[in-house]
Image (spheres, helix red, strand yellow):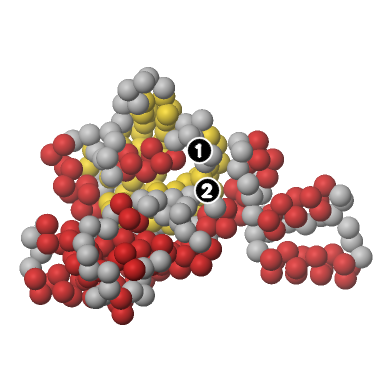
Amino acid sequence: MSAENIISSKNLCFSYEQGKEILKEINIDIKRGEFTALLGHNGSGKSTFARLTNAILVPTKGSMNVFGMDTSDEGKLYDIRQNVGMVFQNPDNQIVAAVVEEDVAFGLENTGVPPAEIRERVDEALKAVGMYEYRDHSPGMLSGGQKQRIAIAGIIAMRPECIVLDEPTAMLDPAGRKDVMRTIRMLGERYGITVVLITHYMDEAVRADRVIVIDEGKPILDGTPKQVFSHVDILKKTGLDVPQVTELVHKLNRYGFDLDPQILTEEECAAALAFVLKEGKS
């Protein structure tokens, strides 16, 4: 595995006990510091792939290597999970303490980190996600978005090099989703953490450095958001949506416009339309 690739799957296959093959010959490399969004409809295998990166599941065939460690090696389980943190869909399933700062400290206490360092890491993690002022609160009194940020703080405090988030905003309202996505983007920009985001929200995937689309257990698209979302027909065929701006551009081009199919933002779209109208082109 290249030193630059921290997650590397080779001919990876996975089947549950029922025998149905969920992932088929997956070859994916994820680079250090990269923010990768993994898309796919329900049952496509994207969440299964997430669990394979953290050795919650192990390959049926092929291999998954994380930081040069084979996830099938039980002797490496502790090291793998120290390097790859997981955040799940429902924050209530990850909160274990009655006070916010105690919850963030839980993992550190269980790995024998000295008390003084625990205090420092907990404070730093809570400040990073904008929840320091809630350190003495009960998690039960927080909103869904705030709880998810506490769950992320608990992972940040462990200082992993990679965080895998499995649909972390699926149960949140729009405000909560916005807060959590701002936090996720910060992980890479401020701490250099490699982020793998499993999501079905296109506007979240647009913020990633790279987007991988999985359909029926195999990657079918892999590239920058602009590259991937320009394939509107392929995405729709797999049951996925596309950003509204991308769909608008796609429809306008069908009616004779000549707009860049890689337009993703409202600002880009407005500028392109203004140019077309000014030049009298369509």
Residue 193 sits in quarter: bottom left
Above or below, comparing residue 29 to residue 270 in the picture: above
Q: Say if residue 182 shows up in the picture.
A: no
Identify the residue at image location x=17%, y=49%: 79
Instruction: Farthest residue to the top: give it.
Output: 19
Q: Amino acid at mark 2?
A: His
Instruction: Give the quadrant of the N terminus.
Output: top left
Along the viewing direction, whichever of 257 and 171 lies nearer the viewer: 171
Residue 24 vs 258, above or below: the answer is above
Q: Residue at x 47, y 31 (%)?
A: 217
Q: Is residue 12 left or right of residue 103?
A: right
Q: Position of residue 114 (x, y in %)?
A: 7, 68
User: Which residue bears the numbered disc 2?
Assistant: 200
| Residue 279 picture location, percent across and down | 89, 68
Question: Pointer 1: residues within 10 angstroms few (<14), some, or many (20+)?
Answer: few
Question: Under tag 1, what secondary structure?
Answer: loop
SS at mark 2?
loop
Q: Are marks 1 and 2 in contact (CB under 8 Å)?
A: yes
Image point (32%, 39%), residue name: 52
Residue under numbered circle 1: 42
Q: Nearer the viewer, residue 133 or 9?
A: 133
**What's the residue type where badge 1 is placed?**
Asn
